[in-house]
Amino acid sequence: MGSIYGARLSVHDEVTLIDTNSTLVDKINKDGVILEEAGVEQVFHPAAAVSVAGLGKMDLVILFTKSLYSDAALKAASPAFGPDTYILTLQNGMGHEEVLSHYVDLDHVLIGTTEDNGRVVEAAHVHHGGTGVTNIGLGKGHDDVMRSRLEASFKAAGFKPVFHEDIRQLVWDKLMVNATLSALTAILQCDIHYIASDSYAWSLCSAMIGECVMTACGEGLSFDVEEVRKRVHSLSVNDRGGRTSIMMDIKNGRKTEVDSITGAVVRVAHSLGLCVPHLEMALSLIHALEGRG
């Protein structure tokens, strides 16, 4: 996702991609980033670096790392943060502002979600799949000039930015898919389609959705549990062969970002005194699978 946004934004703006993989950085600087979109390959040429040294202060930093690496990534990038720097997170999960606000003022933290998706074909070659809206929640006391600049840049790059005074409903809307269906694909090591096709898997997913909706409503948001179940079921039915990143993390022996996804719902539920046993079990199982290495 960082390659997709960085590549497209680089057409009209000065963009530097930061990655600790020096081989990948060298390849991007030499050959560019290949985006494969609707069967067409196009090469973009953002700059790339292994650190922010010498780059000066940034207007905008977009964070796409997995949440368990957020603090380390931001700490390494902190020399690029100035009093006017904004950080936009388009990561999965919830609660990112707790980490981001350690590095910039809270009114310079932008919480967002994206309907775009992508997968790595090979180094510096990314397939840009589904496209959609980039939702951006505005911080309190946000700067209208920054908003206008951000909107213009994203539109020029072909994205569809939509700004919200309160983005919580949209964050929870995406979270409910990842905390339930995606979490189950990791535990069962299956593709997205399997969850709806198997009665036992769907029964578990349905129960987890119920707990998510109960928790979100406890936070003062409004969701209809049957509508959410219908949407998640449809997503599963229509995605044959689709694999979630959390499933691939477990398959490849990597740590996951489950604590900011399913774990985030569990923490909110506990703070509200709610019982969410299916989500708790899913969270524990994924951590147990991580422990196998």
Image (spheres, grey):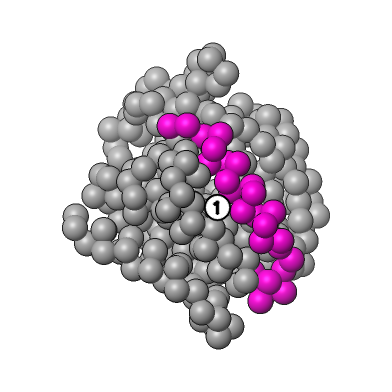
Q: Is residue 108 visible?
A: no
**117 left or right of 26?**
right
**Residue 21 x/y as whole percent:** 30, 40
255 w.r.t. 36: above or below: below
Q: Main secondary structure of the magenta part?
A: helix
Looking at the rendering, which quadrant does residue 243 occupy? top left
Q: Which residues are magenta?
A: 216-241
Q: Inspect the magenta stretch and tell me whether residue 224 lies in it.
A: yes
**Residue 246 x/y as whole percent:** 39, 49
27 w.r.t. 97: above or below: above
Instruction: Identify the residue at image location x=66%, y=61%.
Output: 225
Give the farthest residue toward the bottom: 273
29 w.r.t. 230: above or below: above
**Residue 175 x/y as whole percent:** 56, 57
Q: Is residue 121 visible?
A: yes
Foreground: 185 or 3? Answer: 185
Q: Inspect the magenta stretch and tell me whether residue 59 lies in it.
A: no
Q: How many marks?
A: 1
Give the farthest residue toward the left: 292
Foreground: 201 or 142? Answer: 201
**Residue 198 x/y as whole percent:** 44, 45
Q: Residues within 10 Å of mark 1 (few under 14, many from 20)?
A: many
Three-letter code, disc 1:
Val
Instruction: Identify the residue at image location x=63%, y=66%.
Output: 213
Instruction: Identify the residue at image location x=60%, y=41%.
Output: 234
**41 left or right of 272?**
left
The residue wearing badge 1 is 177
